[in-house]
């Protein structure tokens, strides 16, 4: 058994010493193979080194929730404004036109819904990952959940094995543990577990002290948006995450539940890629909303 005696929280995150990106523009990718780097380059903008992923995978757990009733009407029109589309095979195949050229981050674990106990999942077959032309794969780990932690980490690790076989990057989606404090210590642990298990991208939640979460995660970190917030608050969250070193967002509800989703995704892009301050992002949002 691991020696748990005298575990000390990390307190030296080297915040003034950026990771070495001299051989490839994304953190932690220097030694990766060509195919993986090429796929990461489809997802992360070469100039900013960041991404605005659009998450619409909620339905496989929750059914047709608000904003996702009709992916063909609500999400397909947003696709061209996102850097990457994160969703499930069924909705992508049936409702995102095949002519779409945005890269796909395919949700690759499935098995349970909000009606039972979540995260007792299995993985899609590897043929599916190839035939969907995925630029990245995603699966969740539920850290701190006694019933599903080991299953989800094992699944995730297996997915990395499959991804590595074809040089497809794997994104680790860190679930919010029911009984866990939503703080930097918890999200830092979950994110690091994802990276230790081979993630090329980690998706987690913004929290105070996020710079430590990013610093201790050796691959690009993107944030989920979480529940719908007023636009200015969602833009502030994205801005603060970027200031802490995040490599972008994988945002769902704060985009597709906005009263003006195209305006919102463009405003988020402005903050993520173009260095807009939250107030400037909001101004862009209002202008685009009124023009529509
Ligand atoms: C988690 O399993 C999923 O990837 C979520 O669907 C995603 O994190 C939700 O995005 P948001 O919190 O921005 O709606």
Image (cartoon, rainbow, N blue to C red):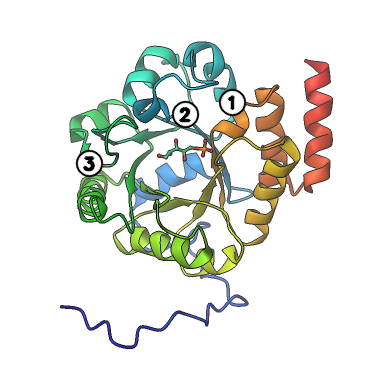
Q: Which mark is residue 269?
A: none
Cβ at disc 2 under 8 Å from ligand 1: yes
> Where in the figure is residue 5, as x and y percent of width and height?
28, 87
User: Which numbered disc flags the more N-terminal residue, 1 or 2?
Assistant: 2
User: Which numbered disc flags the more N-terminal residue, 2 or 3?
Assistant: 2
Q: Which residue is mark 3?
A: 120
User: Which numbered disc flags the more N-terminal residue, 1 or 3?
Assistant: 3
When the figure is inspected, residue 241 is found, relative to residue 80, above or below; the finding is below
When the figure is inspected, residue 135 is found, relative to residue 76, above or below; the finding is below
Cβ at disc 3 under 8 Å from ligand 1: no
Relative placement, left or right, of 234 versus 126 is right
| The one of 15 and 3 positioned closer to us in this rendering | 3
> Where in the figure is residue 22, as x and y percent of width and height?
52, 66
Count the numbered circles shown: 3
Q: Which residue is mark 2?
A: 56
Q: Which residue is mark 1?
A: 256
Q: Regarding mark 2 in the picture, which secondary structure is present there? A: loop
Q: Regarding mark 3 in the picture, which secondary structure is present there? A: loop
Q: Are marks 1 and 2 in contact (CB under 8 Å)?
A: yes
Q: Is residue 109 visible?
A: yes
Kindly report which numbered mark, 1 or 3, lies closer to the viewer in this rendering: 3
User: In percent of the image, x 42 and y 13: which residue is there?
Assistant: 95
């Amino acid at each position: 058994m691991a020696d748990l005696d005298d575990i000390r929280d990390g307190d030296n995150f080297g915040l003034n010493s950026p990771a070495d990106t001299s051989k490839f523009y994304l953190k932690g990718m220097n030694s990766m193979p060509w195919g993986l780097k090429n796929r990461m380059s489809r997802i992360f903008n070469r100039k900013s080194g960041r991404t605005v992923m659009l998450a619409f995978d909620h339905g496989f757990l929750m059914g047709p929730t608000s904003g996702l009733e009709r992916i063909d009407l609500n999400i397909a029109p947003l696709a061209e404004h996102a850097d990457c589309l994160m969703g499930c095979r069924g909705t992508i195949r049936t409702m995102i036109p095949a002519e779409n050229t945005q890269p796909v981050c395919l949700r690759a674990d499935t098995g349970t819904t909000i009606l039972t106990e979540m995260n007792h999942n299995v993985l899609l077959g590897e043929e599916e990952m190839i035939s969907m032309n995925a630029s990245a794969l995603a699966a969740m780990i539920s850290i701190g959940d006694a019933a599903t932690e080991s299953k989800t980490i094992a699944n995730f690790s297996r997915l990395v094995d499959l991804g590595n076989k074809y040089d497809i990057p794997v994104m680790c989606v860190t679930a919010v543990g029911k009984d866990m404090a939503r703080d930097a210590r918890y999200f830092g642990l979950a994110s690091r577990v994802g990276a230790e298990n081979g993630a090329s991208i980690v998706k987690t939640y913004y929290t105070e002290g996020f710079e430590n979460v990013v610093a201790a995660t050796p691959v690009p970190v993107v944030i989920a948006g979480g529940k719908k917030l007023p636009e200015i608050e969602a833009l502030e969250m994205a801005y603060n995450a970027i200031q802490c070193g995040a490599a972008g967002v994988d945002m769902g509800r704060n985009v597709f539940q906005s009263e003006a989703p195209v305006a919102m995704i463009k405003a988020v892009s402005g903050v993520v890629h173009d260095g807009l301050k939250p107030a400037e992002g909001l101004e862009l949002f209002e202008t685009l909303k009124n023009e529509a």
